[in-house]
Image: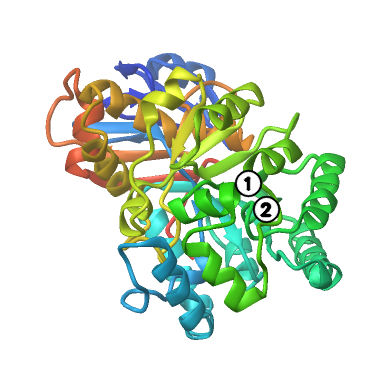
Amino acid sequence: MQIITPHYILTPNVLLSNMSVAFDTTIKKIAPLEDLKKEFGDAAVTRLNKNSLLMPGLINAHVHVEFSANKTKLSYGDFVPWLYSVIENRDELINGCDDACMAKAINSMLESGITTFGAISSHGMDLNVCASSPQNVVFFNELIGSQATMADALFGDFLARLDASKSIKREGFYPAVAIHSPYSVHPILIKKALQIVKDENLKLSAHFMESSAEREWLDKNKGDFKDFFENLLKQKSSVSNSSEFLEYFNGYETLLTHVVKANEEELQTLSSNKHTVIHCPISNRLLGNGALDLKKLQKHNIRWICATDGLSSNYKLDLFEEMKCALFMHSDMPLLELAKNLIKSVTKDAADALGINSGEIAEGKNADMIVLDLESEPSDELAIHLILHRYNISKVYINGKLKKGI
């Protein structure tokens, strides 16, 4: 049992002062220090410096750890040229990122206060390093393949990777499933994977409506994807349209990433099925996909959370940086309200979407917490300042244990 005494606690909706937190792996009680010392007499007490802030650890729900070798290999500015550059450089990117490379990316997330991440794993090469990571990990085994003739082989590979992830037995590691996208996964594969998801109650994620190319291909079998699919896969039409794709997920809450080009009907479907949208603002800008309309999501009562995506479409895995970019990207939204929603999106809302018992400084929640060293007494605009000023993170607790990297 431990007791930590910061100057301030962000819960993340309310700012507390003159309170301490008693915890082991979970948060046991929040009360004045003297009360906690009486109740937990044997607990070690950590008193933090002036203007210290204890807040929930951050949750990065969507990151491609396997592609962490990229810095200058890929083409930015438009989705399809970027996709061609990924294919052209795939072997070099994958083979150029060994466990040390991936561990560096994971440690960078830890240093920026990320205590849980959702790893989208295409090849399973990141399994060991994710299993060894200090953070909680939702390990999304990704299924991809639009050709029916390859369905059995692709599904066999997916099952092998899923089984390997299920063999990891450690606190805070959760096997899960990702369906790549409506244009890249054959319905046969989707149905088989979703049966496993439902039978085993696994978390589920997918990319959806990221680009104009996807929009045109799914709606009309035209656009920039036409040459791509005809030349590389000898495919003249999409394997699913958007409504067919979303119908597969009816009745099962899914994390859908990007959703920049979704129409009103699709947003209504997302809302009625209680899906969550993962917003990756830097990735969307670098790939020329535009800005997600957060006002429309709020209008439809769709939960959205912020994430970094991978280093194939970002320059760092830092949620404070991601939130800062979002703060400027959505310039038509009230600043303080947006800042508060962004903080909530990478704490409580992300935890709820992933089914993780964290995201809040509250009794009964996992003790996933970070300490920030503020420069002065916080004001009513604390959420804005947290995002803008990138205060030093002096401590990171995961399941009650102080962490320092792989």
Q: Amino acid at mark 2?
A: Ile
Q: Residues within 10 Å of mark 2 (few under 14, many from 20)?
A: many
Q: Among all residues in the image, which is located at the extreme left?
A: 376
Q: Give the left or right position of residue 206, taking residue 66 as reference.
A: right
Residue under the image location 77 percent in, 52 percent down: 190
The one of 39 and 211 positioned closer to us in this rendering: 211
Residue under the image location 38 percent in, 15 percent down: 32
Proximity of marks 2 and 1: CB atoms separated by less than 8 Å: yes
The one of 134 and 330 positioned closer to us in this rendering: 330
| Picture coordinates of residue 342, whole percent (x, y) | 35, 32
The one of 116 and 5 positioned closer to us in this rendering: 116
Q: Give the left or right position of residue 7, taking residue 60 as reference.
A: left
Label at residue 205: 1
Q: Is residue 371 above or below residue 148?
A: above
Q: How many marks?
A: 2
The answer to whether residue 43 shows anywhere in this view is no
Residue under circle 2?
Answer: 179
Q: Amino acid at mark 1?
A: Ser
Q: Is residue 52 above or below residue 107?
A: above
| Picture coordinates of residue 390, whole percent (x, y) | 22, 45
